[in-house]
Amino acid sequence: MKHKILVVGSGAREHAIIRALNRSVHKKEIYCIASNMNPGIVNSCENFTMGDINDPTFVTNYARHVSATIAIIGPENPLAAGVADVLWSIGIKTVGPTRDLAQIESSKAFTRNLLKEYHIPGGPEYKTFSSMRGVEDFLNTLEDNYVVKYDGLMGGKGVKVAGEHLHSHTEALAYCKELLDSDAQFVIEEKFIGEEFSLMSFCDGDNLKHMPAVQDHKRAYDGDTGPNTGGMGTYSDSNHSLPFLTKQDIDDAKTINQATAKAIKNKFDLSYRGILYGGFMATANGVKLIEYNARFGDPEAMNVLSILESDFVDICYAIVNGNLNDVPVKFSTKATVCKYAVPNGYPDNPVKGQEIDVSKISNHNGLYYASVNIQKEKLVESGSRTIAYVGIADSIFDAETIAENEIISIEGPLFHRKDIGKKELIQKRIDHMKSLR
Ligand code: AMP
Ligand code: GLY
């Protein structure tokens, strides 16, 4: 049988998904619904269509048209819009949870309440609000350690952290009022102090297979300065842990993911079939849960999928068929460093539509296209994270050298973080955790 695999989305994450699918031994055709002419994807698909990836009718019509046998949803917005629901309803098994279950990402309050209801460890002290009643009292309880979170999808930009984005209770109250003025609910929670990491798990509803831990870098500039971004780069280590984590930290994160998948199933009597991405913070008091995402991370997908040794097509079918325990899920014991080149001015005022040139890249296997379009046979960046490069080696430092040498060779009005994966930055993380523990 030839598999007809539909991928929804067209960033670097989806490029990585498609590249991993293409390594499979199975006979297959890959189809993609895209929001930009990603050159890496266009060239590796049977068919490619541009359209609104968040429109369930558009996606299902195309899925029917190409007789898709399975679908994989990359980004969070189609999940929140119920694209998986309608694909399942027309008989297309889908990697990516249905809308109710995707609330694990789309609603901060839902996730906090779920963890509390099922006594899952790692949650902060928190309260949910839909008016200003009680806000000031709760801020007074948390003193200087609070975070205010808009209760919905905002690409990470709805979260404001005390000491970073909010410098007094007056500022916090003003932000809460701003959210209420736009009809939004919000969560206020205890601020955790530590080092962040991501632990993603493949999940078929009952069984989880965990991926290597990854650390992302949200700030735009070197030294963790500048505005927050979608993620400027990531690294993972050859032992699938991170230099600042203990074995206990990794075990605890896995346990929390497992307990969460079980809780979702219990709550909805439905299986969570997709990627469960736990965003964690290692703290002096153990591992804490910052957030869940209902999909692969971007850039985290590039780190883990590029060292996935097992057959990704088999894994996807096992996720949707509920037999994940029957297939091997193995990653090579290599370190990875992924760096993003982004447009000058990103994220606040990015240049747009400028030509880029990748001809000096020496090994295209590590290159993933993101916000890139093809115009008059030329590559142009389209204003968001542009190109990611993944270096793979025995050590993080060697992987960093590879990624840095390649990413710096891309020509165009772009910048990247030079420090991600470098000794100084990693030592800083280790020292920070040492001082806290
Ligand atoms: P989120 O969208 O929930 O991941 O939040 C975005 C970022 O805000 C996270 O990556 C953290 O850096 C920070 N953050 C969120 N919640 C907390 C928390 N409870 N304590 C400390 N930092 C947090
Ligand atoms: N790298 C963070 C995210 O994908 O949300």
Image (cartoon, rainbow, N blue to C red):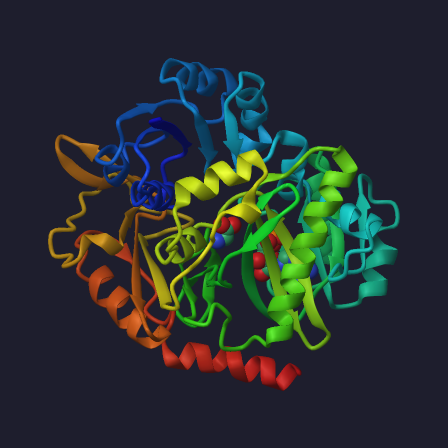
Residue depicted at x 23% and y 53%: 365
Q: Is residue 134 left or right of residue 70?
A: right
Please, is residue 332 above or below residue 128 in the view?
A: below
* Whether residue 175 is visible: no
Give coordinates of residue 389: x percent, y percent. Answer: 29, 57
Give coordinates of residue 268: x percent, y percent. Answer: 75, 34
Quadrant containing the C terminus in the rendered view? bottom right
Q: Is residue 339 left or right of residue 130?
A: left
* Whether residue 120 is visible: yes
Give coordinates of residue 229: x percent, y percent. Answer: 46, 53
Residue depicted at x 24% and y 38%: 353
Please, is residue 407 above or below residue 153 in the view?
A: below
Please, is residue 7 above or below residue 200 in the view?
A: above
Please, is residue 194 above or below residue 79 in the view?
A: below
Q: Nearer the viewer, residue 94 or 160?
A: 94
Q: Is residue 215 left or right of residue 272?
A: left
Quadrant containing the N terminus in the rendered view? top left
Q: Quadrant of residue 335?
A: bottom left
Q: Is residue 122 left or right of residue 38?
A: right
Q: Quadrant of residue 100?
A: top right
Q: Nearer the viewer, residue 187 or 299?
A: 299
Badge count:
0
Residue depicted at x 46% and y 44%: 315
Give coordinates of residue 436: x percent, y percent. Answer: 65, 82
Residue depicted at x 48% and y 59%: 218
Q: Nearer the viewer, residue 134 or 17?
A: 17
